[in-house]
Amino acid sequence: MEKTIHKNSIAYLRHIHFAFFTIILLCTSGHTLFGQSFRLGGTITNTTGERIPNASVFLGPGRQSQHADNEGKFYFSHLKSGNYTLKVTALGYKTYHVAFKIDEGQDQNLRVQLEAADNSLDEVNVSGKSELQQAREQAYQVSVIDAKKLHNTTLNIATALNNVPGIRVRESGGLGSNMEFMLNGFSGNQVKFFIDGIPMENMGNAFRINNIPINLAERIEVYKGVVPVELGSDALGGAINIVTNSGKTSYVDASYSYGSFNTHKTSVNAAINTKKGFQFLVNAFQNYSKNNYWVETESTIDASGQLEMVRTRRFHDRYRNEMLTLGAGVRNKKWADQFLIGIDLGEYAKDLQNGATMEDVYGERESKGLTILPSMKYLKRNLGLKGLDLNLSGNFNLGHDQTIDTASRRYNWLGQVINPKTSQGERDRMNSRYRNNDGVFTANLSYRINPQHSLVLNNSYTIFRRVSKNLLNDADPFFDKRPSSLQKNVLGLSYRFDYSKKGNVSAFGKLYSQHSKAFGVVNNVDNPSHQDYGWMQNNFATQGYGFATTYFIQPKLQIRGSYERGIRVPTSNEIFGNMDALDGNISLKPENSDNLNLGLIYSPSFNDIHFLTFDVAALYRYSRDFIRMEIKRNMNSRRARMVNLRDVNNKGAEATIRYRYKNTFNIGVNISYQNLINQTKYEGGQEDMVSIVYKDRLPNMPYFFGNLDASYTLNKPFGTDGSLTFGYQLYYTHEYYEGWPSIGTASTKMTIPTQWNHNANMIYSFKGGKYNLTLECMNLTDELLYDHFKLQKPSRSFNAKFRYFLFKM
Amino acid sequence: MRINRLLIQLATFSLLGLGACSKDNVNGGGTPPDDSSSKKYVIAGMSATAEESKQYLFLADRLDEGEITVKGNGYETAGGTMYALNNKAVTFKYNRGDPGNAEVFQLGTDNLLKKTGAFNIKSVNVFLPFKAQDHLIAYNIGRSLTTPGTAYWVNIADNRVDRTLEVDQKLIYVDGKHIENYFGWPYAMFEFGDKIYAPLSPAYGGTGTQDKADYKDHAFVAIFDKNLKFEKTIEDKRMPFIGQYYNTIGLGQVSTGDIYAFSNGDVESSNNHSAFLKIKNDAFDKDYYWDVEAVANMRIRAGFFIKDNKFVLVMVPRDTKQAEASGVKLAIADVVKKEFKWISGVDTKITDPGYGFPLFTTDGKSYLPMQEGQSSISYLYVIDADNYTAKRGLKLTGIKDITGVGMLKK
C-alpha cells in the first residue's frame, strides 16, 4: 500500500530551475593504467540530485550504448582520446545531449542532470523509476512517505507516520512525550525501526521517531506484516525504515520554527562532497518546548484532596533535546564506494507533568539522558564479482538515561504546592541511572546474479548491556554493578526471481538466536532478600520465513501479496525482570505471527491533468504467544511478570483514494479498520471456564480511523516566482474502550472518545525553493484530544517555519 | 464544585429525611416499605482476566444465593479497595502511580450506582471505618525510617478529607526500650472504645548492616487515642507480629469486651506459631496464650472476629507447596473456651487468593468471598458460626479479587 503525503502539494523540488543542463567535468587525477585507452564514467541524477536508475546512455561516434545501473551510474572503457557525443534518455525526463572531448591522459567522470519532462515524473514512467517509486512498487506491502514533500512542515517522523493507513501514533502529551506506535494492531517491540537499514533500538531517547524532524528523512518506508531481510531484526508485525539523504550530493537544508507553547525547533542538514571523493555530513537538530498548553482537568485544590474542574496551563512539562550527527568519509574509491565514520551526540531533558492519567500530577519529577553513538558504514559494490555488493555498518551507544523523583512536595494542576512535606517522591522516590551499552552490527551482502535472479544475505548482531545504579544516598549497593546482558543475532537469506518485467517473487528465511544473562530473583519468593538473587541465563534459537510477490496486470495496475511468519524474541527485561516491580519469567517463548497481505494499486491518469490512485489492501494476522504483563497480587505486594498470554487474530482492511489535478489541487482520504479479536480461550489455567473475554475485541487499541488531506497550490502568486500552497489535514479516530469491551456496564466504562483533529497550513516557497515560509495551525478547532484515557494532548497551536534549502551538484 | 458539594449535601439531607419518613411510616403502622427495592449489596471486585483487568462495583439483591456476572455489568472504578459506610461506597486506588481518584458512589433513584463525589488521596493502604459511620481513616504508610505516615480523615457526609495528620512510625519498643533503626509498619487500625489499636510489623530502616534480630517474631500493637495521638506500644514475645497487609486486622473484640489478637505466624523463626493473645487494659494479658497451630496443625492465613467469642479462621498448611496443592480450610475458633472446630460444608478445594478475604457480616449472617478451582469464578460463602458450617452463596462469574462487600440503601 503506497501513499504519498501531500501535506503541501508543492513539489518544490520541481521548481528548482536550472537554466541549462549542466555537465561538470570533474578532473580525475593521475594517468590511466591502460596506456592509450581511457575510461568514461558518469552519474545520472535529476535536478535535485536523486539518482535516476536504468537510463539509456548512448556514446557517439560508434553508438556504444548501455543502461545505467540502479544507482544511475554508467561506465565506458577502452576509449581513445578525441571528440565524443553523449545522449541520455530516461522515461519522464527530457532527453539530454552533450558533446565533449577526451584529452590525452585523462579519464572522465561526468555528472548528468536530467530535467523532468513536463508531465509528472513519478506518475508516468515505468522503467525510469525513482527510488521512491521503486520502494513503492515492491512486492512487500509497503507504504512510502515522500518526506521531502513535508520538509516545510514542522512534523516529526512519528507525526508524519500518523498519515499512513494502518498506523496510529498514540501520544501521551506534547512535544517529547511518550508515544506508542501502532501498526495493524502491533505495538511496542513488535514493530521495529531502522534508519538507513540499521536498527534503531539502541539509539537512546534523544533520538526517537517523535523528536527526529522530518527534514532528516528523504523518505520513510513502512513495511506491514512482512519485512524484507535487509531490515535485520526480530519484528513481529512490521518495520519502519527511515531513509535519510545519504549525502550523494552537496546541499544545505536549514530550518527554524517557532510556535505556541514556546516551541523552538531547529534543523540543519548538510553534506559536502569534494571532487577528490571526500564526504562530510552534518545533521543537527534541536527541539525545545515548554508544552504549557491548556488542559481541562479535575485538580486537587488543597491537601485534603478536594477536587475542582480547572482549565489551566501545564506547568512542568518542559522538553528539550539536541542531537548532532557528524560523519566523514570517502566515496567512489576503489576499495570502497562509501566509507563513513560518524558519531551521534545527543541529550534530552524532560519534565514529567503527570503519571498514567492526569489525576496523578507532578511538579518536579524529571528524566534525562545522553546518547553517544560512534558509528561506521562501509559500502563496496561489485566486490570481486559484478553485482555483488557488500554493506557493513556498526554502532555502539555509550549513553545513559536517568529518572529523578526526589521531591518532597505534592503539587496540584494549578502548580501550587498542596502538601509541602511528603517524602516518598512524587511517584516513587528514585534517582536511578541506566547505562545502556548496546551495539548493533549489520552486514548485508547482495548479489544480483543477472537481471532475473538475485540473492540477499543479511546478518544483524546486537549486544546489549544494562548497568543500573541507584543514586540515592540510602540505596542498597547490592544491585549495583551487576549488569544484565544480551546478544541477539538475526540471519536472513532471500532470493528474488524477476520472471518478467511485469512481476517478481521473493522468498526468504530468517534465523534468530539469543543469549541473555541477568542478575535477578532466582528463588520464587514474595519479598526476596539478598540470598534470593543470583545469575540467570537464557538461550534459544528459532526461525521465520515468508514470501512476497507482485504482478503488474497493466502498467498502472499492480497486485501484490505477501506472507511472513514473524518472530519477536523476548527482551532481557521480559525474561529476567527489572529488579523493581517486574519479575522475570525464564520460560518465555518468542511471540510469533502469521501475517498475510493482499493489495491492489490502480493509478490511472486522464489527459495528464487528472491523476487518481486507488490503493486497497486486506490483511490477516494470527498471532500467538503475545508477551503481555500478568499481574499477580499477593498479601504484601503486587507483582507483575511477562507471560506468553494472548493469541490474537486480526482481519483488517485499508483503503486510500487520492486525486490530483495537475500540480495544483490534491485531495486524499484513507481509512483503516482492524478487527483484533482475542483468541485465548483459557487464561485462568486449564481448569478454568472459557475466558470471559474470549472472542472479545482487544482493549485500548484504536480499531477504526482515517485521515483526509487536501491542498491547493497557486503558482507565481506574486508575479514571477514562487508558489503558495494552502493545506488542510484531518485525523479521525473512532472512540474505543480502555478496557475489554464486553466487560462492565457500557455507560460507566473508561472511554477514549472519538477524535477529530483538524490542521491547516500555508506554505510560500520562492527563489526556486531556496526559501520557504510556513504557517501552521494544529488542532484548529481546539478540541480536547486524547490518545489515552485522561491524557490530554496539546490544545490549538500556531507555528511558523522558515526553511532555507540550497542544493548544489 | 461548591455547587456540587451543596447539591450532595442537599441530597444527603433529603436522603436522611427520606429515611426518617420511612421510619415514621413503619412506626405509624402504614405499609412497610419493600425493603429489597431500596437496599442493595455492593461488591468490589476485579474482572477475571489475566491482564487488562479493571476494578468494578457490582450490585446484588441477595448475598446468599443467585449469580452476578461481569459481562455487560459492573461500574468501572479507578480504585479497588471499597468500604461502604452510611450508604455510600468509597473506592480507593492502591498505589501512588495508579490512575484515578478516590470515588464515592450511592444508589441512585433508578436503584443503580451513581457516582456522587471524588477526592484525591495518594497511596493509602490501611483503612479504619469508624463505627459511627461518619468518618473513615485512610492511612498512607511511611515506608522508611525518616518518613512519617499520613492519616486522612474522610468525611463521609461531605465526600472529602477534612483532616490530615502525620504519624511518626518509629514505634517499635522491646521491653519498653525504643529500637532505633526500626519503624513500625501498621497493617491495620482497629477502633476500641476511645482508642485506636494499630498492629505493627517491624521493618528495618537503618543503614549499614541490619540488626541480627528482625523482631518480626514479636507481637506489637501501637495504641493511639481517637485522634491518633500516640500513647504507647505494647509488645509480647510469645507470638509473631499481628495482622496482614490488607484485610486481616488480627484483632477482634469479643462479647466479654476483651480484645483478642492473633498472629498468622508468617515468619521464619522458631517462634512462629499462629496463636492468640488477649489484650486487657491496654496490655497483653500474661495469663492468656493459645497456640492454634498446635491444635490445627496448620497456620492462620486470615481471620476475622465473627460473633460471640468466635473468630472465623482461614487455615493453610505451613508448607507452601502443600498449601498450593490443598488450598485453604475454614475453621471457627472460640477464643474464650479455646475451642477449635473445622467448618463443614465446603467439599471442594478453596484457592488461596493471595490477597485477602474481607468478611462481611449483616443481619447475623457472615459472608466470605472465596474462589474454588476455577479462577474466573468467585463465591460468597455463607458462614454459620453457630453450626460450624459454610455453604455457597452468591456466585460471581468473571469476577476475582473481591476486596469489599457492603450495603447501600437509598
Image: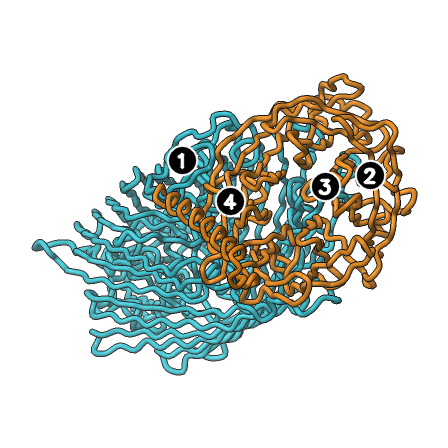
Chain colours: A cyan, B orange
Chain letter for the residue marked with disc 1 in the picture: A
Q: CA distance from mark 3 to mark 2?
A: 28 Å
Please say if the residues under marks 2 and 4 sit with CB atoms less than 8 Å apart.
Answer: no
Of residues A629 and B84, which is closer to you in this image? Answer: B84
Identify residue for label 1.
A301
Whichever of callouts 1 and 3 sits on the residue coming sooner in the sequence is 1
Q: CA distance from mark 4 to mark 3?
A: 35 Å
Mark toward the viewer: 4 or 3: 4
Q: Which residue is situated farthest in the bottom direction here?
A: A553
Q: Amino acid at mark 4?
A: Ala
Left or right of B14? Residue B177 is right
Q: Tag on residue A520?
A: 3
Mark toward the viewer: 1 or 3: 1
Identify residue for label 4.
B102
Q: Secondary structure beneath disc 2?
A: loop
Q: Residues within 10 Å of mark 4 (few under 14, many from 20)?
A: many
Please say if the residues under marks 3 and 2 sit with CB atoms less than 8 Å apart.
Answer: no
Please say if the residues under marks 1 and 3 sit with CB atoms less than 8 Å apart.
Answer: no
